[in-house]
Structures are given as C-alpha cells and as structure tokens.
C-alpha cells in the first residue's frame, strides 16, 4: 500500500470468493466431489491452498486430473452445480462486514471485481443484503472464463478514479498480478484460497485476516 491508511484511498474494490466470502471450505468440498466422480483421491485444505490458482486448469493439472476441453467443461459444470446448491451455507469472513460498514460510513465508494459469473455474483450479493455497499459488481460472463485479467482495465477505468487512488483487496496471487499490471495498489488477505507463503513474495501488503485489515483503516 502506497498510502498510509485504507481511508486515504478514494475507492476500494474487492474480490468476492475467498476474500469477502468465506467459501474456501466449500470450494474444497466441491473440488473433492468432482475428483471423486473421476476416481481421484480427495485432498485436504493445506494441499488445496497450495495448488489453487488461475487458470483453474492448473489446479486439475496439479492433481493429475484431465484438462482437455471436454473434460474441463464437464468438471466445471459439475463443480458449479455443487457450489451453487450450497453457497447459502457460506458467510462473510469475520470482520468483513465491519470494514464494509466503515468504508460506507466514510463515503468511500466500493465495488466488486470477481471471477465469479456475473449473474451468480449479482444474486449472491442480493441474498446477503450487501447491495447498498457496492456501486458496481463486475463478474465473468461464463463459468468457463476464470481469469480476470482481460476485464481489469475496463472495470477499474469505469470507476472514474485515478488508479493511484484505488485499492484492490483480494486473496490470491492472481489478484495481485491483475492489480500490479495496472499500477493499482493491492492488499491480500491470507484467510482465503491461497496460503500466506504464496502471497508474501509478491511485493504487496499481506494481512492475516480482517482484524488486521481493520487496523489499517
């Protein structure tokens, strides 16, 4: 973070899955369900956080699961069906609502920039009654487009704020890479889909959880 405090930025943009939403456990269960259908052994949470990445095919490659187009299409549909049927079991990370409230009270605009499909993103934000926090929700156009890089400039340019005044909060190396490609400040919360030791070498601010992030407010 180039600025001293989060409140010194003019816009805060959030990743959704793993960052605000505490869904890593569910994603692991859905991945293991897909693996079981193909006769592959389950993995535990440390292994999941070690192999998780973008593109999603890299996860399957690390687990020796097939990544040809048809196999990936079938796996993606099975995974999303399993996830969507249980997404209401998740909640926000502890402290996430508090920092959303603080930014809202300080009249600092917020948005979501996510790899989650757009229609699913809009639906879940409504379900969690969080819509009033975000001026813009930017998700992917299908379940098969898992990178955010191709949409990043359009999203951040649409905010009407200098890139120097935007903070992007995520939980993965991909989030940092997207932000750094545009010269946007990034902070990563190490309570999501990737382990802290994977985030530390990236040259961005890393916090353990939202309690630590709130202390930066």
Image (tube, rainbow, N blue to C red):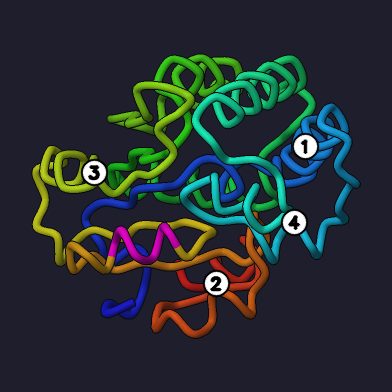
- Mark 3 and mark 2 lie on one chain; the one further toward the N terminus is 3
Instruction: Kindly identify the residue that appears in the image at 65 percent across and 40 percent down.
Output: 66
Q: How far apart are marks 3 and 2 (CA)?
A: 33 Å
Q: How far apart are marks 4 and 3 (CA)?
A: 25 Å
The x, y position of residue 31, in whole percent, is 75, 38
Reply above or below: 115 against 60: above
Please indicate whether residue 45 sits to the left or right of residue 83 in the image. Answer: right
Q: Distance between the residues labelled 2 and 1?
A: 28 Å
Q: Are marks 1 and 4 in contact (CB under 8 Å)?
A: no
Q: How far apart are marks 2 and 4 (CA)?
A: 29 Å
Mark toward the viewer: 3 or 1? 3
Reply above or below: 6 against 30: below
Q: How crowded is mark 3: few (under 14 residues within 10 Å), some or many (20 or more)?
A: few
Quarter location, residue 208? bottom right
On residue 215, which mark appears? 2
The x, y position of residue 134, in whole percent, is 36, 32
Q: How crowded is mark 1: few (under 14 residues within 10 Å), some or many (20 or more)?
A: some
Range drawn in magenta: 174-179
The question of residue 176 being in magenta is answered with yes
- Mark 1 and mark 4 lie on one chain; the one further toward the N terminus is 1
Check disc 4 and report its element: helix, strand or loop: helix
Q: Do the residues labelled 3 and 2 touch (CB within 8 Å)?
A: no
Label 1 sits on residue: 26
Looking at this view, is 51 or 1 the one in front? 51
The question of residue 184 being in magenta is answered with no
Check disc 2 and report its element: helix, strand or loop: helix
Label 4 sits on residue: 48
| Res. 97 in view | no
């Amino acid at each position: 973070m180039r600025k001293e405090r989060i409140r010194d930025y003019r816009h805060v943009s959030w990743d959704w899955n793993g960052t605000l939403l505490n869904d890593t456990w569910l994603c692991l269960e859905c991945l293991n369900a897909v693996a079981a259908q193909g006769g592959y052994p389950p993995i535990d949470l440390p292994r999941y956080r070690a192999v998780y990445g973008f593109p999603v095919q890299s996860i399957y490659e690390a687990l020796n699961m097939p990544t040809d187009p048809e196999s990936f299409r079938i796996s993606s549909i099975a995974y999303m069906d399993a996830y969507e049927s249980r997404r209401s079991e998740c909640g926000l990370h502890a402290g996430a609502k508090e920092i959303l409230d603080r930014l809202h009270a300080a009249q600092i605009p917020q948005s979501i920039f996510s790899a989650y499909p757009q229609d699913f993103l809009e639906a879940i934000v409504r379900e969690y009654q969080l819509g009033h926090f975000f001026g813009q929700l930017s998700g992917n156009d299908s379940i098969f487009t898992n990178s955010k890089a191709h949409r990043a400039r359009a999203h951040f340019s649409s905010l009407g704020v200098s890139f120097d005044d935007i903070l992007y909060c995520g939980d993965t190396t991909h989030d940092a890479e997207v932000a750094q490609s545009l010269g946007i400040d990034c902070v990563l919360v190490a309570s999501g889909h990737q382990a802290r030791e994977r985030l530390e070498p990236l040259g961005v601010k890393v916090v353990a959880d939202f309690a630590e992030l709130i202390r930066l407010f």
